[in-house]
Image (cartoon, helix red, strand yellow):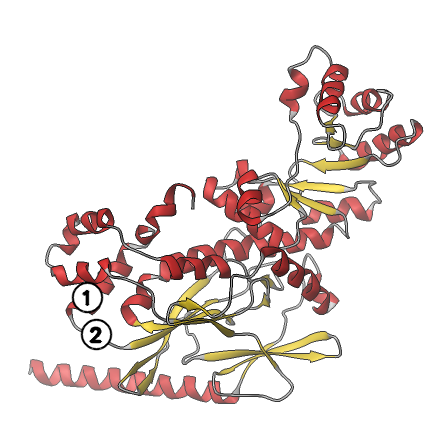
Amino acid sequence: MLEVESQRALLVDLYELTMAAAYFEQKVDCRATFELFVRQMPPERAYLVAGGIEEALDYLADLRFREEDLSFLRSLPVFRNISSGFFDYLRQFRFAGAVDAVEEGALVFAEEALLQVTAPILQAQIVETYLLSVINYETLVASKAARVVRAARGRGVLEFGTRRAQGPEAGLRAARAAYLGGCVATSNVLAGFRYGIPLAGTAAHSWTQAFPTERQSFQALLDTFPEDAILLIDTYDPLAGAETAATLGRKIPGVRIDSGDLLEKSCEVRKILDRHGLSEAKIVASGDLNEYKIASLLSQCAPIDLFGVGTDLVTSRDVPALSVVYKLVETERDGHVEYKSKFSEEKVYLPGRKQVFRFYEGAHFHHDLIACAHEKPPEATPLLYPVMREGRRVKSRARLADSRTGVLSNLPLLPEPYHALQNAPAYPVAKSAALQRLLEQVHEQTFARQKMEIGNSKMETR
């Protein structure tokens, strides 16, 4: 992926590798299951759109350590006492585990597993950082995009955020996630090449400034791109720019307003275009837009046909991070399963492999149930399904366009109250009785064991 494409094995937190080395040296040989989920819903998010699943599977299938990766790791002081056998292990590293996941683009909620990894514990540990990073960010942006698209009420939303993203790779991932969430196009050409996303954009203010007059710049752009040119009319004065565009004596595809009072300016520009017989010319609005501003504009009947959204979309400025975690939920040695959880304050999570079930009332989502993997409640739809076995995909990579269609089809199934941009109610997610009992059992066993260890330690120090 851009400059880190060939070095993804090192795109990992150091402690994943130090733990892996310790597992190797101490011969910790068990099969582990980790689940990746969002600990809690952020403010002003009633739902999330699962993103990054396909990218995560690509990473798992292709992960390799190169000789220069191993040479660098050997040079680190922390590995000075680690045997050469561990580095031989990394040299031959291939992810050989099983993965269950929700479909990319699925609507998900707090504590519901998006991804479930079962593999030898060294393998499952090493991949943690990358999985968290890609799924956190793409889910964040796809969820923001879905809100922006919903606010646009059927008008197209263009993703314009690469230059404001936190680096080139983030810009590329944001373009992918924004399209997944419902945007109709991106300005990022590499995203168009890699993912087949439609592209949008023709010229900036510098184009207009490069010509002696605004009229000449408009004419030159239309001569070059007669069917695609969107004329940026607010380099100097948007109403004068609209008048100039409308009096060129030719059909124009559309105009863009990038500043000022977009409600007032779009209404005046529409009148100017219509007065000169250009009723089919589109008005594109951009300039620090988000779902709240778009909703306000359309509630006041702004005659805007397309919205270009950049900074707020690719940074998800109101909610810039999700509490995505990757937690060990069980281990298996010689057929014996031990369930795992954590009981530190505000960080308790549910033990054991799980399934997420969705219940419907008529055509709409009614509630979800997180249950033990073996449970099969009637009239419920499971959300996790096999996507990888023995390190290989179960089926071919999903097309991004198909995943996007799934998002646009599923969003109307979520009842209207959960689409509120502010103060939306919490979607109901229940835990099964069996899962609650398992949590209590693990809690009792964990603290009984801890108490026994403390007692034994006191006896040994006497």
Measured along the vertical axis of the image, is residue 279 above or below residue 455?
above
Q: Is residue 317 visible?
A: no
What x and y, as percent, mark residue 368?
60, 77
Q: Is residue 103 visible?
A: yes
Disc nearer the start of the sequence (2/1): 1
Left or right for 373, reference 74: right
Q: Dot 1: few (<14), some (14–19), or many (≥20) neighbours within 10 Å?
A: some
**Farthest residue toward the front?**
396
The residue closer to the viewer here, 56 or 361, is 56
Residue 108, quarter of the rendered image: bottom right
Measured along the vertical axis of the image, is residue 128 above or below residue 331?
above
Which residue type carries mark 1?
Ala
What x and y, as percent, mark residue 316?
56, 49
Residue identified by numbered label 1: 22
Which SS class for mark 1?
helix
Residue identified by numbered label 2: 28
What x and y, as percent, mark residue 113?
49, 71
Q: Residue at x 20, y 47 (%)?
A: 72
Q: Dot 2: few (<14), some (14–19), or many (≥20) neighbours within 10 Å?
A: some
Q: Residue at x 59, y 66 (%)?
A: 106
Which SS class for mark 2?
loop
Distance between mark 2 and mark 1 Cα atoms: 8 Å
Residue 121, quarter of the rendered image: bottom left
The residue closer to the viewer here, 284 or 387, is 387
